[in-house]
Image: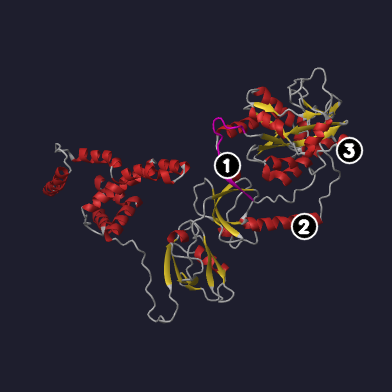
Amino acid sequence: MDQRRSQTGEADGRERGPASREMGRPQSPALSSHEAERLALVKLPETGVCELLATLPMQIQPHVSEEDSDFLQDMFADQSLLSLVKMHERLRRYEHRSPYPVTGSAAALAYELAADLQSNKENEEVQELLNLLAKPHVKSLLSVHDVVAKKGYDPALPPLPDDMDDEEDSVKIIQLVKNTEPLGATVKWDEQTRAIVVARVMRGGAADRSGLIHAGDELKEVNGVLMENKKPEDIIPIVAQSRGAITFKVVPGIKEVRPTLEPKMFVRALFDFDPNEDKAIPCKEAGLAFKKGDVLQIVSREEPAWWQAIHKGNGNTRAGLIPSQELQTRRLVLRRALARVQPLKTSNQRTYVDYGAISGIHIAGLRRSFRLSRRDRGVCQCECGGSGRYDTADVPTYEEVAPYRKQPGAPHRLVVLVGPRGVGLNELKRRLIISDPEQFSVAVPHTCRAKRSQETDGVEYNFVSKHHFEVDIINNKFIEHGEYKGNYYGISLDSVQSALAGNKVCLLDVPTHRIKPLRTKEFKPYVVFVKPPSLQRLQQSRRNVKVIYSQDEKGSAKLFSEEDFEEMIVSAQVMETQYGHLFDRVIVNDDLATAFRELRSALEKVESETQWVPRHWTLP
């Protein structure tokens, strides 16, 4: 053995010597084998594939976007990738030596050795060796060694039948190794040929990764079971009961040209989906469950009714079926049509009032809602235009989204608070502004009433003439407006823009039907829905809280009634049902201090973390 090692070292020296001289490198002193191996590992990232990966981003930089260039640099600098490259380089060096396996039956030798040692197992060292050879990891290692030595990587396929007709359709015999994951293919019954064919292959599944099974292939046998007179549902138990390798005999279909890869498309789900409850899904096992608000990556839209998607960020690359936007839209429109045939019966139609800051603290520009109490509803102009109606043009299915992070110096996102009257929107705004007046502000409202002696134009209100106010209404310059005792009140777009231009986060509460017009690239609103707790909790937490019924004056206040609590809960349910797909965050105001901390934390994340927003907000 020492002699062989010496010969190998001399051979390596003869190979390296001329190469070093040809490259003009000076001869270096002899290194020990350990030092040489350590030196090779240190130098490895600077040569070969690593060097290519380091220079590739610079070479392609003129041809890609800055975002793609940054992505490539981060990917090529990843330590996991560098480790794989090191392994690749070491294996290439090993292949140059043309190693020849000493034996291809190491597992059998180990078994024979263990049998021979049984007679002397009283010896501690022998017993230790027997225990070592009996370990499953050692057995697996020896088994893998034998497979590599024999280079028998391909599965052993059954032989073709001897009596096969030459004119019979060409048949492929495919063998896939089944593990815990589904195979990732669905089948259907062809009504014309009465054959079982592959309907679709799920992206990222075992069948897709194998590249052997394609949509349109006809199944002849599965694990020796003929598919003649079988139904698609009969195949599921056959595959489910199979262990290890599954053998398919298929007649290849007409192989279509695979469409070009679709650009990455991310959507936010605006509804809940459970494939086990969907009677129309082709295969419940192939479905992908999701909740409203989940971000999905659409990997295939080839079928008009069923898309293939994966959850963004969970690491599972196997796609599942989800209803397409077209299919889900048709479903929702049909449900709404049926709902209009049987309208929801309610005991009364009431609006709600805010309970606000009655602690005596006054903040300039923080006003009570313009939306009036039920006793003043007859003169309200801003609520009657749709707050109680279902927006049938807005069908919540999916919304295409893209990652967005606020850059330094960019305008803040508009923060929109919505909720039933009495839930505490004004108090939450008040606490936010008190907590950091340099960070938060509100839009100064407009009015046409006369300015009072203690008021300052542009602080409590922007005072304008009635004619000027009416002209602005006609020109759609108001986000919301109302009339009280012959005077107009409202929040204008200019006021919101002015608040955002002051480099502050503008807090705005609006009726739910006004959210959609605000969802623009300019405002990028972050919508927070504040909902009440249960009726029992309302009775406990707001027993001594008063309702303020006046709009612009200090008017009377009275305690909440049971009717007020019931109205608040019903109103919140209607809001969430009709407009819940537009909410970015839902906060239950069970305890005001807890709700404030949750809201403040959410707004800090909006400023500092990446958020998923409608894609058109991020386009140039």
Residue 127 in view here: no
Q: Quadrant of residue 152?
A: bottom left
Q: Residues within 10 Å of mark 1 (few under 14, many from 20)?
A: some
The stretch drawn in magenta includes residue 391: no
**Eye-nearest disc, 3 or 1:** 1
Count how many numbered circles sit on residues in the image.
3
Q: Sequence order check: which comes first, mark 3 or mark 1?
A: 3
Q: Residues within 10 Å of mark 2 (few under 14, many from 20)?
A: few
Q: Is residue 411 magenta?
A: yes
Pointer 1: what residue?
A: 618
The image quadrant where one finds the C terminus is top right
* Sequence order check, earlier mark of 1 and 2: 2
* Residue ID for mark 2: 338
Query: CA gap, disc 3 to disc 1?
Result: 42 Å
According to the picture, the residue beneath numbered tag 3 turns out to be 378
Amino acid carrying mark 1 in the image: Thr
User: What residue is rendered at 65% in x and 30% in y?
Assistant: 500
